[in-house]
Image (spheres, rainbow, N blue to C red):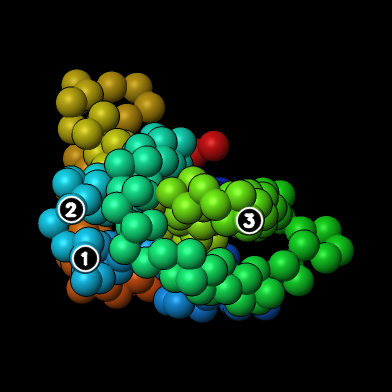
Amino acid sequence: MAALAAMALSGCGDAHLDPMAVIQTEETRSVLALTADLPALPELAERPGVEGDMGDAVTRWTASWHRPLDAGRAMRDRAYGDASVVAADAVGEAGIRGMVGQVDAALAVAEPLLAGDPDPEIAAGILRARLLRDEAVRSLAAGRLAVAMRDVLGASDALRELGPQAVARALLARAEEALAREAHAEAGTEGGVSDLDLERGEHLVLSARLALDDQDWTRAVRRAYYACQLLGATVR
């Protein structure tokens, strides 16, 4: 995923780093708290007049968080496109303006992180959210409600990419890729992990999945992070 995922993932090769110590710095702690009040496609789908009218957009939106950043973002973009007309009709201009207000409140928390010498991934995520928010406001002024809905959802998710749930899912995706690769490698392959580390990695991946199901993001991040270490996950 984006900023905080990149920070956590960058430590996969360092056995001395606690992933939560990497994430929970003074610089980033406020970002971790801002996703709770952001608008989201599943919440919109539960509103009166919307139920059942979004097809499988919510399912695809949810599944997108299990994918690497670029693939997940593309899935979300398609989900917005499929759902935006129905959602915009249901909440109207006032509802979309309220969603813009939620994004503005989150940006007010996040934008101080741009001061000084910010982490480039954090900066990119915040600036992407700001750009999409501004596009939503322009579309509202022009009466293009469906386009505004799409953009405000994109802004919200650009900030959501900075949160702990996304970090956990990004780490788990990398660990699962590494686990699949090592499980199919021939025993004794040069550079491969030992049988013991492979078994430990399997247990850590399973534990991370269960922690995600329980919405225990801290435990999920730690388990997936250490699975990355054991399995030699490479990240960008």
Is tag 3's residue or tag 1's residue first in the polypeptide sequence? Answer: 1
Q: Secondary structure at mark 3?
A: helix
Which residue is most to the front?
A: 143
Do callouts 2 and 1 mark residues in contact (Cβ within 8 Å)? yes
Which amino acid lies under the numbered mark 2 shown in the image of this protein? Asp
Question: Is 225 or 29 nearer to us in this picture?
Answer: 29
Picture coordinates of residue 142 (x, y %)? 61, 49
Residue labelled with disc 1: 49
The reply, left or right, for residue 118 in relation to residue 224 is: right
Q: Is residue 132 positioned above or below 111 on the image?
A: above
Q: Secondary structure at mark 1?
A: loop
Alpha carbon distance from label 3 to label 1:
24 Å
Residue labelled with disc 3: 141
Do callouts 2 and 3 mark residues in contact (Cβ within 8 Å)? no
Q: Is residue 2 positioned above or below 215 on the image?
A: above
Q: Quadrant of residue 110?
A: bottom right
Alpha carbon distance from label 2 to label 1:
8 Å
Single out the mark in the foreground, 2 or 3. Answer: 3
Picture coordinates of residue 203 (x, y %)? 18, 56
Residue labelled with disc 2: 53
Q: Secondary structure at mark 2?
A: loop
| Residue at 57% across, 56% down | 140
Question: Is 155 or 182 nearer to us in this picture?
Answer: 155
Q: Crowdedness of circle 2 by 10 Å Cα count: few (<14), some, many (20+)? A: few
The reply, left or right, for residue 27 in relation to residue 42 is: right
| Residue at 19% across, 40% down | 195
Picture coordinates of residue 220 (x, y %)? 31, 65
Alpha carbon distance from label 2 to label 3:
26 Å
